[in-house]
Amino acid sequence: MQSSAVLHIASLHGGGVDRHLRDIARSVPRPHLFWHAGPRAEVLELPAARRFLPLDPRAVRAPETLDAFLRHARVGVVQVHSMPRAARERATGLAQRLGLATIATLHDVLFLRAEGLDPGAPREADAAWLAQTAAVLRNASVVIAPSEYLAALARDHVPGLDVAVIPNGSPPPADDARPLSPRAEFAARRPRDVVAMLGTIGPHKGSAVLDQLGPILAARGIAIVVIGYLDAQVPPGWRNAGVFVHGAWQDAEVPALLRAYRARLGLFPNRVPESFSYALSDLWDAGVPVLAPPEGALGERVRAHGGGWLLPPGAGAEHIAAAIVEKLDRANAAELARVESLLGRRDPARVPRLDDMARSLDALYARFAIDPHAPDAEAPAVQSLLAKNLDGSLFREEVARLADELVQLREGLEAERVKAREYEAESRGWIAKLEADVAALDAELAREVEARRRFDEENRQLRDNKAALDLLPAILRRYLLRKARRARG
């Protein structure tokens, strides 16, 4: 019998949450649906079919046909992955209407306060916000966290909450990955040593410190390569003398890119504690030791499994640069080699594997999911929803508005074309006049040049005649000059 499906509800953002969802869909052998919930837009994704169904707000507010569609899709459990209001409301409402259990997965500290990932935000919880998120967590059949750090944080702030730790798994690194090359701009200025950062690096991951850190390291022959991009720089290229942005990447390319850039260290200058960090797993899988902050899951994982060293709490650019220079110094080559050797031995406790995560999650789905009655595909409610998705009636008002805007755009374009034709005609008149004026000037110039040529020829002839006259005896010259004057008189 076909397994019931899992409806995953998350906010409209990517990053580690998106990678986690797609890893689940690929590795847990049951159907999955993704509901991307945002304050202004919502999309239902069918990942196996690679289909995206934008949801009309009216259908969300009057959700009978959506509920029928989800029952027909055999959704048996709801898993919420985000704590913003839209995601919470969708998870709670759907679970109540469909009679389903809820699984809540915490991916970050945003259950404590809405701005929890802002570097300057207070670390303590916002009481009003926590009251809303705690209600969702308490009503969940099970709460999951990827690290003991995040689980303990949830238990401390929601007393009595039972949190299961299921680390985010990674697929085994590919041994036959094709070799890649660094970007040409980097290869032209390759430094002596390279430190790598992975992912989309925003303020909470320490992007601001790179503008200070880069020049300090560049003076020591060291550069930071961001395999990914920064909040302040998306295109590839040098950010400053010591920071190079590689740009977009695929997860499977990370080992080959680290080898191509010859990365010897991984760096985490985080300003906000991490809850797990796929980037740490990827660096360790590639055999690259790391420098990480002592807070959060990064510090927890490095202390538990080795694989690197911890920075001082709140380390700034000077402290981070000093730590990098120390670890890459030849005097510490033996210590660096020891950690590289440690990372060369695969350890599923250090880098959890995707298959282990999938088995743990599937066991929870099997325990809490129900086998919902699937209505007949010919049922009116299901047919209504499918028809709306196919003929676009969910967006009839939006289509009418867009059609009106298109008419206005075409009318405006035609008016601009008329103006352009008038301007072209007027311009042609001016061009013809200018061309005639230029032709007249050319003719006048030609006449002036010809007159100057004749004048120069006459002057030359006079000079020749005078030279010949000067060669005659004086008495003969006087005779000829008198004769010439008589001829003129």
Image (tube, rainbow, N blue to C red):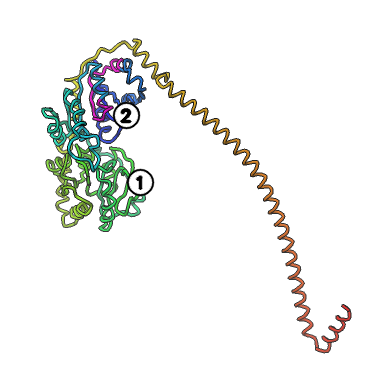
- Given residues 421 and 172, the one toward you in this image is 421
**Disc with the residue nearer the chain's start (2 vs 1):** 2
Is 368 covered by the magenta stretch? no
Residue bearing the label numbered 2:
39
Q: Which residues are magenta?
A: 67-88
Mark in front: 2 vs 1: 2
Which one is nearer the viewer's eye here, 337 or 196? Answer: 196
Residue under the point 10% across and 27% down:
160
Answer few, some or many: residues within 10 Å of disc 1's Cα (few below 14, many 20 plus, some between 14 and 19). Answer: some
Residue 76 lies in the magenta-colored region: yes
The answer to whether 311 appears left or right of 70 in the picture is left
x then y, percent, for residue 481: 84, 83
Disc 2 is placed on an element classified as loop
Q: Residue at x 63, y 41 (%)?
A: 424
Which percent across, then down, holds residue 299?
15, 42
Q: Quadrant of the C terminus?
A: bottom right
Give the Cα separation between the discs numbered 2 and 1.
32 Å
Where is residue 359? Give x, y as percent: 18, 26
Examine the rendered structure and indicate whether residue 459 appears above or below residue 54: below
Evaluate if marks 2 and 1 touch, with contact meaning CB atoms under 8 Å apart: no
Displayed quadrant of residue 162? top left
Q: Amino acid at mark 2?
A: Pro
Give percent across and percent down for residue 101.
Answer: 20, 20
Label 1 belongs to which residue?
A: 236
**Which quarter of the rendering shows the N terminus?**
top left
Q: Amino acid at mark 1?
A: Pro
Is residue 289 visible in the rendered image? The answer is no
The quadrant in which residue 388 appears is top left
- Helix, strand or loop for disc 1: loop
